[in-house]
Image (spheres, coloured by chain):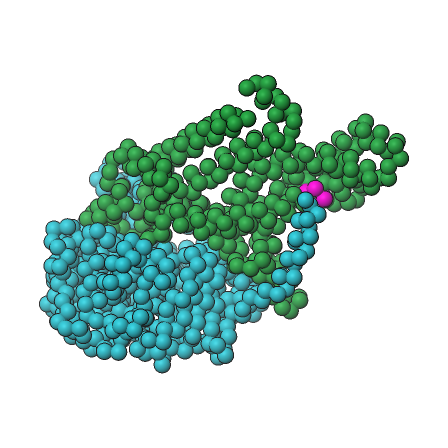
Chain colours: A green, B cyan
Amino acid sequence: MAAYILRRLLSGALTIWFIATATFFAMHAVPGDPLSNEKAVSPEIRANLERRYGLDQPLVRQYGIFLGNMLRGDFGISFTQENRRVNDIIREHFPVSATLGLVALIMAAVGGVIGGSITAYWRNRWPDHLLMLLVIAAISVPSFVIAALAQLGIVGLNRVVGLPLLPVGGWGTLSHLWVPAFVLGLGTMAYLLRLMRSSLLEIMESDYVVTARAKGLSPRQVFFRHQLRNAVLPVVTELGPTIAAITTGGFVVELVFAIPGLGRFFVQAVQQLDYTVIMGTTVFYGAFLVLVVVAVDILYGFIDPRIRLHKRAVS
Amino acid sequence: MARQVLLWILICLPAVVVAQPSAAVDAQRQRVVLALATEPPSLDAMVATDQISSFVLSHVMEGLLQYGPSGELTAGVAQRWELRPDGARFWLRRDARWSDGKPVTANDFVFAWRRAVNPETASQYAFILYPIANAEAISRGELPVAALGVEAVNDYELAVRFSAPCPYFLSLTAFMTYYPAREDVVQRWGRAYASDHDKMLYNGPYTLSRWVHSAHLTLSKNPRYWNRGAVALSEIDMPYITSDAGAQYNLFKDGRIAMAALDTGTLGDAVERGYEVQQFLTGSLFFLQFNFREGRLTANKALRKAIQAVMDPALLVYKVIGLPGVLPAYSLFPMTVRGGEGPLRDVHPEPRIRYDLRRARQWLAQAQRELGLERMPPLVLLAGDSPRAAQEAEYFQYLLSKALGLEVRIDAQTFKQRLEKMGRGDFDIVVGGWGPDFDDALTFADLFSSWNENNRGRYRSDEYDHWVRIAQQSFEPAQRLRAFAEIQRLVVEDVPILPTYESANIYVQHPRLQGMRRSIFGGDPNFRYARVQ
């Protein structure tokens, strides 16, 4: 097992190096640079700027400096957020995205499992049809539309109630969290709901469920003990990769709800060609993704005896 | 697991009802709440370049001069001053204080200005100090910073030497790059200077009392500000940072913020709800810029004249842009540029070219003759990638094809790629714009001088350069006005650019917020003289 973990970690490190290198050269190949602005500057000011940010060095040397700094965990200073270190930007804003993402994920998982159970239980009856319609809407309507609609909904709700029940935007208290997290998790929830539904339908037909019923268990006991437990497994499997996607993909939600998450920096840095922030966030997210995948792989070994036995047999 | 999560959510639900976001305005505490479009990219006044930073800095800092309640230049840290062709002298007030209680002295200006032109600081706005003797040479690294033509005669007297006469220098001293800075504080924080609210000092009407990056800024009245009696608002709170106009408008509708910008999407709703919609000319000019580089079709004057003769800015503004307040542009100088008492164009009205299809076709035929072309090859129009930019570009494309049979290829590029192509001269026509830096017509007039980097079409005219030099250096108001008039005429005659529109902002504002001033210079909006009724 230790050798397996070590091998997975090593390949993870290699992946991160590859992501960093590819991003570095792709980013520099894009025409334009972080120092250009609508108002042009004279050549001597331009030269001063290039010197300050080390862009006067040859590209290979810049790459060498970047790699050295990356190994020390230092991504330098942002071009657009002058005087701010990229490490500080990640440290301050990733927890915001992560909190939002985690709550979104919990909502998505809970909603997906409950919704999936309802649709499967009342298959082809009105709760099923209604929920599946909502699922299709949640998957096909882009998140910026849903976010804007949700915000309008809050404004309307507050007006009807006559007091600020839910905040329209901002960050800081728990109440700021619910609606953005729900909007962020909606797509995932819809996906998990469908997954849960099909998995549950499959299990409902299986022999051991028939056996359980034949033994005389109540429908409730059959559902909770035999069907739900087994049907939820594929949903749990999906959660791993989704964690990374949902904690990093909140750009639109963060923008609409004025939430200071890292997703905004990630997207804006690319628009502004903010080299250091692009590298910092990409490597950070890349490493995060790789770590989650490795962790899930390792966890599988513990959860599913078949995988563990298989790995042992191989190694 | 799921049961526990549900329980946890139920426990937390009451928080929804308990959290009461504060109201947009509070008369008792004289407090307003606003939203910011972005985090201020830099509050280091000597390197800041953008509007958001300028807005924050203009409330927490003060230069030698500042802008008064109706936008006029008035005394700031300097109590009185003297402007001569060879230099200027400022006498500082003794009661101007930094937020730590120490007096603001002439040395703080000397230090800040030297730092701004220091090549190591690499300020993009270093050029705005170039009227000061030796500034340009220092920026090139040819002279030490100590050679800068500014000197503290004593703690409260500042002497400035010019490299050439600078009749508009007073308006420069209100610009953020000219704000003072305390050497000990800048040295202490080094590169982290002004990256947090406790890593800088303030000498303006407010201090930055809270700065949670990208989330929350709070400005509190500065109890040490010399003119604190004139400051009514005790707090300007900005707990929302989003560039999404729809989100800002929703915050306004919900009563969370005291003002919000409108766009075509939200304007209708605002009118329907009976909000009082306000408008304000930003002072920015938009235009089509032609490429004069060798081998470009647009280097041909007859072709530019042909395009000029069919361009009708009014049509663009009223039929395509369709936002109230935006004005069709006919001159290099927007209506907001002053010349003497009123607008410059009241003194010297611009020559206007009327829409004339027959004349345009004659010009086009002449262009084809001169270029020796049977048929005009397609022209490349470089533009931005926003929906609005696309709309405008398509209008120009349609216009030139319909009226003159010219084929226009739209090259829509993202921000940085567009800048790169503009710099390289990879276009025939490019959509450009300019926002003024200081309150003098020169901020527009020198744009197309042969030495200006913003002259991206490389237009070159000795006559234009000649008048720019006069406008830069003459201390005779009448002679300067004449120079501006000549420059305005040359822009119409030579067509280095075709002005299209003067931009405007439309916005809604809380009715109890009074005295807030939209300003073209020195930070916008301006809350120095605002109060809540």
Does residue B505 appear to the left or right of A143 in the view shown?
A: left
Does residue B518 appear to the left or right of B252 in the view shown?
A: left
Q: Position of residue A215 (x, y in %)?
A: 88, 32
Q: Quadrant of residue A27?
A: top left
Residue at x 28% of width, y 32% of height: A60
Residue at x 36% of width, y 37% of height: A71
Residue found farthest to the front: A2
Helix, strand or loop for the magenta stretch, by majority: helix
Residue at x 35% of width, y 39% of height: A72
Q: Position of residue A222 (x, y in %)?
A: 82, 37
Between B384 and B517, the one nearer to me in the picture: B517
Q: Which residues are magenta?
A: A111-115
Q: Position of residue A54 (x, y in %)?
A: 26, 42
Query: Can you say which quadrant of the picture contains the N terminus of chain B?
Result: top right
Residue B468 visible within the image: no
Does residue B487 appear to the left or right of A249 in the view shown?
A: left
Instruction: Tell me if residue B511 comes above or below residue B309 in the rendering.
Output: below
Does residue B154 appear to the left or right of A93 in the view shown?
A: left
